[in-house]
């Protein structure tokens, strides 16, 4: 166990109380985030059941290669930040710092690949509301699919950005040896947030990329 | 070293599951495609939540919070879904509304 | 926690001023620093509560101004005071401001913020900086909303139904939605703070079933806040996107479904009404035992009922959609569940009544408000059952019956409880006693004005007057005039406390630590309390509400 001294905020009586409050607080926040994504998943359910074929046709227009690579990248980044938290707990602060930088790098790679996907989709007129065009018999459903696709992945990307900022923030503090500030508790909590962003993508991947891949 | 081994093991499982879901998508299984994909996604998520997010290590309050969040989102799906499942839809020809706002034009 | 066993001290109607008070020499949370900067950068939950109080008072009067114009217009059958469009904007403004800027934050962010840490024996909430941030976020959202009003208003109703709001409305829909979204974030922050605080920061000996019911109520409210509000937030985002880009899932012309919006909207907005009423019930559960000098009847059932209301409240949202095209079978399920949600509410009403039975009751201003709450909430709740019946709802939906129903609960219930709580804890917050006579006068005025305003609306609704119309058939005029007359009395009743409470800040009698001889940890601190609430962390050894009624013949006034 970490034997470093901890900064205890004045409203708390003990380090254990502070840690419990902070961890619990992050879990509650993640619960609100799940409810925030919820309506989008429900909208997807609506679209999928009402426009099954159109959703399949639209899904086949997503870039499965980039999508699958991105999923690999994000899952790996989750492993990286989990290892970073473990390293910090064991006192291996240089390793923790490097792993946090790796996590941030993987997250950034994800965003870059996503940006490339978006550009392709823009060029293929698949952005709803902005010169969208699709096979006439599927237009309504495909537009709904891509509306949800952009909102879901866009929202996910925004959350990922926040995660990258958070990760870099602690990585830089570790680089400057601010061990009291960048302690185990905080890095664990940042990791919780990162894992949540990963879990959302775990569901987005099959929802968006794998509908009727084998053909409608 | 034990902790890093666990990270590696879970990562490996996630990769295997990803390969499974990717390859199964190319098989024409109809409804089962969706089922398999969703099941694999649920397992992946469970691995991340239980092992990376240390759900078992957390206090009871945390586990209850996680469960309640899941339950709430299912509630939205199930009860609203019951409306969609039991609604009797009678189609009517599309009638454009008589009064459109001047500022907004509907592009259809 | 020790309770005075001397029967003399058990009388709550005589406020005590002979106890040690916080003199001007010793520091309390208010007097320690008067600079503006110390207020705007405070981490102290008590100061943040006062920041909220100032804000919600301002929003209350803005929303009330809209209501005033509405009632003036409705005094005559013709639409002669304002145009139909302006009228739409007025009731939208009234709804949006009263629901999101006033009612939802009122008791939790003012009384909850001030009292919760003290009631559990803590120095502050779990996340004081988050608390301050929540106020700034709230103010930002409020300003966006006011901006939308100033720039011409919104005419969709506070319910923003699609496709009108997404495709056809010409008003500042997106701006007001941004405002509501931001305010929603503020309430999530508050709810998160409360939940973590109650779980992790209770003083030694303060077990769950020794918590005051006010804490239980705010805890359950916070659970609803964190789970339901994000759904509203996303729904508003989707409406905004649909309005901007003309694509989305809510417009049938695009393959979408208006009921999808309604499901998502009401999934939040029904629990939202429990966000508004549960804290009010918590306040009433503190006031009634104190002024009946009797412990709450059935404390555990009261706690379970609070949780029951919160849980079942999440299951009933479809009762707002009975005539919208929702499946009849789903409607039946929602109707049944709506009947069920009345059960825990009724349990609470029975238990308050049983608490009063054989108590030593004094009719102080807080008690008048609390008793008013019980009566008016009961009426409002019962009429909710009318609306929950599918067949009756076909007749009553979108009429003034609905308007009367929810105003009985929101105004006759929640607002009265808020005022009761402000009066009850005024000595603790300010160290002063308000003038009791004026307190009682205002309470009675509000009660009478309220009933005169809203009871006729039940009759109007039953007879078929639709809501949200600025003109109506002449045969409805008499009842409308009664309603508008009542509104003027209500307005006076609401203005009175502004004056005498302000007066009391400067000229009121100084209050001791426990002028009402109430139980609860918050009364063990000086009035006003010091910054850290307690000198040493209290240790709780007694059950809550350890009052003993006394039998006297002829009570002193």
Image (cartoon, rainbow, N blue to C red):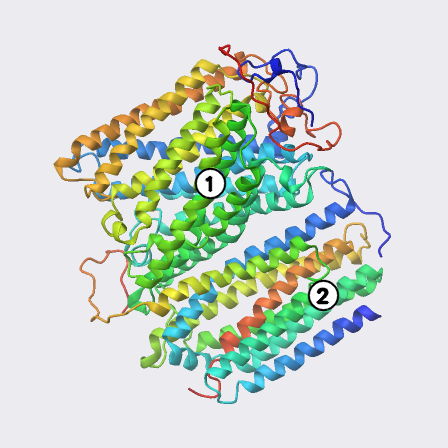
Q: Position of residue A154 (x, y in %)?
A: 51, 65
Q: Residue C455, located in which quarter of the rendered image?
A: top left
Residue drawn at x 31%, y 47% is C387
Q: Which of A137 and C489 is in front in this view?
A: C489
Q: Mark 2 points at which residue?
A: A81
Q: How many marks?
A: 2
Dot 1 crowding, Cα within 10 Å, few <14, some 14–19, many 20+:
some
Dot 2 crowding, Cα within 10 Å, few <14, some 14–19, many 20+:
many
Q: Position of residue A24 (x, y in %)?
A: 66, 52
State whether residue A109 appears in this view: yes
State whether residue C60 appears in this view: no
Q: How far apart are the alpha carbons under marks 2 and 1? A: 50 Å
Question: Horizontally, is C449 left or right of A17 in the view?
Answer: left
Question: Horizontally, is C190 left or right of A139 in the view?
Answer: right
Residue drawn at x 33%, y 65% is C257
Image position of C149 with respect to C537: above or below: below
Q: Which chain carries label 1?
A: C
Q: Where is residue B48 in the image (x, y as percent from the top left)?
A: 66, 68
Image position of A37 with respect to C427: above or below: below
Residue drawn at x 42%, y 50% is C340
Between marks 2 and 1 in the image, the one whose residue lies nearer the viewer: 1
- Image quadrant holding the N terminus of chain C, namely top right
Q: Which numbered tag is attached to residue C90?
A: none
Q: Name the residue under label 1.
A: C347
Q: Residue C166, located in which quarter of the rendered image?
A: bottom left
Same chain assignment for discs 2 and 1:
no
Q: Nearer the viewer, residue A99 or A91?
A: A91
Q: Residue C390, located in which quarter of the rendered image?
A: bottom left
């Amino acid at each position: 166990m970490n034997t470093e001294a901890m900064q205890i905020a004045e409203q708390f009586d003990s380090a254990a109380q502070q840690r419990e409050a902070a961890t619990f607080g992050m879990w509650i926040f993640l619960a609100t985030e799940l409810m925030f994504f919820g309506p989008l998943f429900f909208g997807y359910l609506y679209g999928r059941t009402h426009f099954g074929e159109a959703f399949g046709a639209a899904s086949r227009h997503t870039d499965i290669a980039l999508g699958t690579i991105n999923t690999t990248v994000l899952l790996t980044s989750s492993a990286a930040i989990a290892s970073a938290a473990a390293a910090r707990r064991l006192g291996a602060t240089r390793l923790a710092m490097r792993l946090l930088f790796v996590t941030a790098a993987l997250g950034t790679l994800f965003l870059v690949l996503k940006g490339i996907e978006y550009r392709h989709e823009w060029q293929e007129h698949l952005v709803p509301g902005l010169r969208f065009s699709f096979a006439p018999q599927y237009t309504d459903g495909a537009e709904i699919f891509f509306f949800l696709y952009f909102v879901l992945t866009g929202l996910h990307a925004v959350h990922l950005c926040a995660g990258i900022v958070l990760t870099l923030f602690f990585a830089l503090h570790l680089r400057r040896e601010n061990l009291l500030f960048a302690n185990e508790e905080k890095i664990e909590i940042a990791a919780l947030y990162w894992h949540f962003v990963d879990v959302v993508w775990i569901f987005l991947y099959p929802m968006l990329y794998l509908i009727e891949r084998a053909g409608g | 070293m034990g902790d890093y081994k666990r990270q590696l093991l879970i990562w490996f499982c996630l990769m295997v599951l990803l390969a499974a879901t990717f390859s199964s998508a190319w098989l024409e299984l109809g409804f089962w495609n969706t089922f398999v994909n969703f099941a694999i996604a649920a397992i992946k998520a469970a691995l991340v939540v239980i092992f990376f997010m240390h759900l078992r290590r957390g206090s009871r309050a945390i586990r209850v919070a996680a469960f309640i969040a899941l339950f709430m989102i299912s509630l939205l799906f199930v009860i609203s879904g019951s409306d969609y499942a039991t609604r009797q839809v009678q189609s009517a020809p599309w009638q454009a509304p008589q009064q459109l706002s001047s500022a907004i034009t509907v592009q259809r | 926690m020790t309770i005075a066993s001397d029967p003399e001290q058990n009388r709550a109607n005589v406020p005590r001023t002979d106890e040690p008070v916080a003199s001007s020499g010793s520091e309390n949370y208010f007097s320690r620093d008067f600079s503006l900067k110390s207020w705007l950068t405070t981490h102290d939950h008590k100061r943040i509560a006062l920041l909220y109080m100032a804000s919600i008072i301002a929003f209350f009067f803005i929303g009330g101004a809209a209501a005033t114009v509405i009632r003036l217009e409705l005094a005559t059958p013709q639409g002669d005071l304002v145009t139909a469009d302006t009228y739409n904007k007025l009731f939208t403004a009234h709804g949006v401001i009263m629901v999101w800027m006033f009612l939802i934050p009122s008791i939790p962010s003012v009384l909850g913020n001030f009292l919760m840490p003290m009631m559990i024996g803590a120095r502050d909430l779990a996340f004081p900086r988050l608390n301050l941030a929540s106020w700034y976020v709230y103010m930002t959202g409020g300003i966006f909303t006011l901006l939308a009003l100033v720039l011409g208003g919104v005419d969709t109703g506070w319910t923003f139904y699609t496709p009108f709001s997404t495709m056809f409305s010409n008003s500042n829909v997106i701006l007001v939605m941004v405002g509501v979204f931001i305010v929603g974030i503020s309430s999530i922050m508050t709810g998160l703070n409360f939940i973590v605080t109650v779980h992790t920061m209770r003083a030694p000996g303060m077990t769950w079933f020794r918590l005051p019911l006010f804490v239980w109520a705010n805890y359950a409210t916070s659970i609803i806040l964190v789970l339901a509000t994000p759904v509203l937030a996303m729904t508003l985002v989707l409406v905004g996107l649909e309005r901007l880009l003309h694509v989305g899932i809510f417009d049938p012309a695009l393959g979408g479904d208006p009921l999808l919006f309604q499901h998502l909207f009401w999934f939040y907005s029904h629990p939202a009404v429990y966000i508004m009423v549960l804290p009010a019930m918590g306040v009433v559960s503190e006031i009634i035992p104190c002024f009946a000098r009797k412990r709450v009847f059935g404390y555990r059932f009261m706690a379970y009922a609070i949780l029951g209301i919160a849980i079942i409240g999440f299951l009933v949202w479809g009762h707002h959609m009975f005539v919208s095209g929702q499946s009849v079978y789903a409607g039946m399920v929602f109707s049944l569940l709506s009947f069920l949600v009345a059960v825990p509410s009724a349990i609470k009403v029975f238990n308050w009544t049983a608490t009063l039975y054989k108590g030593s009751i004094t009719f102080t201003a807080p008690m008048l408000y609390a008793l008013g709450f019980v009566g008016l909430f009961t009426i409002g709740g019962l009429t909710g059952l009318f609306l929950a019946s599918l067949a009756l709802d076909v007749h009553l939906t979108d009429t003034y019956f609905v308007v009367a129903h929810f105003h009985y609960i929101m105004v006759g219930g929640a607002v009265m409880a808020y005022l009761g709580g402000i009066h009850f804890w005024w000595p603790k917050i300010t160290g002063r006693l308000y003038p009791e006579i004026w307190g009682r006068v205002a309470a009675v005025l509000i009660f009478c004005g309220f009933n005169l305003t809203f009871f006729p609306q039940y009759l109007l609704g039953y007879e078929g007057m639709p809501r949200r119309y600025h003109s109506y058939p002449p045969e409805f005029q008499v009842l409308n005039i009664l309603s508008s007359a009542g509104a003027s009395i209500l307005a006076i009743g609401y203005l009175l406390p502004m004056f005498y409470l302000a007066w009391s800040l400067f000229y009121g009698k100084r209050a001791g630590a426990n002028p009402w001889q109430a139980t609860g940890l918050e009364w063990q601190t000086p009035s006003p309390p010091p910054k850290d609430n307690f000198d040493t962390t209290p240790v709780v050894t007694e059950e809550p509400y350890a009052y003993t009624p006394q039998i006297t013949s002829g009570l002193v006034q």
